[in-house]
Image (spheres, rainbow, N blue to C red):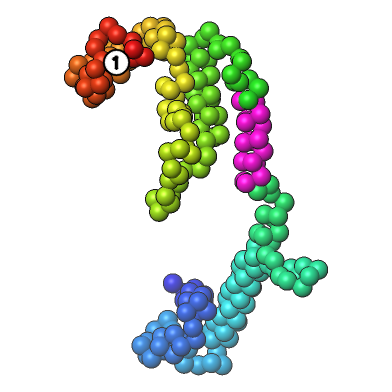
Amino acid sequence: MTVRQVADKLASFVAKNGRQFENITRQRNPGDTPFKFLFDKNCPDYKYYEFQLAEEERALAQSKEAEASKANSGTASFKAPGGTYRSSFEQKSNYQTPASALYGAYEGSSSQGSSSSYGDHTAPPSDPVALMEFYAKKAALEERKRPPRQSKDEMPPPPSLQGPPKKGHHMGDFIPQEELEKFMARCNDAAAQKATKEAAEKAKIQADNIGHKLLSKMGWREGLSLNT
């Protein structure tokens, strides 16, 4: 390696890490070494090294300034007419439609569409999937009409003011039993058919459930109407 090559490498290293490494190199390399030009600041090799060091330091300074200006341009602030400062990111976000506005517009259009397309007087579709969508949207629409639920600390109103209980917690409350059985048959869902029949059987008044026992205590017998 020639002296000029050593001077180039040393200049690059000192420019990146600091001038103190020139003194350290001089102290650790006495005598006849490739760094002997460091001991004679008037020799041509040292002048070459000094020139290369200045060029390296200038290039590094320009690179740092370019990076700093690039970083500042991304977060630069400008003064608004009211005197407040806003970042470029905030300025850009002002032109974006708020999510709440989009959600509100969607809710409004969907609720209108539900009331017109899935109202009480609209005939259910014949397609099985469309039929389930019909009852699902009807259940969602009824649930949306329900008053807000009470908090745990709020006392419920007296029974006389509550009125008759309303269904609507599940989609199944809005699906007629016949339609549900037809849908299960079309889909060939044996497990679902079995579960539906079991639920219907459990809902009936039987001798082993509480409703049957209470009616029996009141004098009711099987085969009699509840109004007798």
Image location (x, y in percent) of residue 72: 65, 68
Can you identify the residue that label 1 sits on?
A: 204
Quadrant (top left/top right/bottom left/bottom right) for the C terminus: top left
Q: Main secondary structure of the magenta part?
A: helix
Is residue 197 at least partly visible in the picture? yes
Image location (x, y in percent) of residue 199: 30, 18
Image location (x, y in percent) of residue 30: 37, 90
Image location (x, y in percent) of residue 99: 62, 46
Left or right of residue 185: residue 114:
right
Vertical position of residue 160 compared to residue 81: above or below: above
Magenta range: 99-114
Which SS class for mark 1?
Answer: loop
Q: Residue furthest right?
A: 81
Residue at 52%, 79% in the rendered image: 15
**Nearest the eye: 194 or 220:** 220
Residue at 25%, 21% in the rendered image: 218
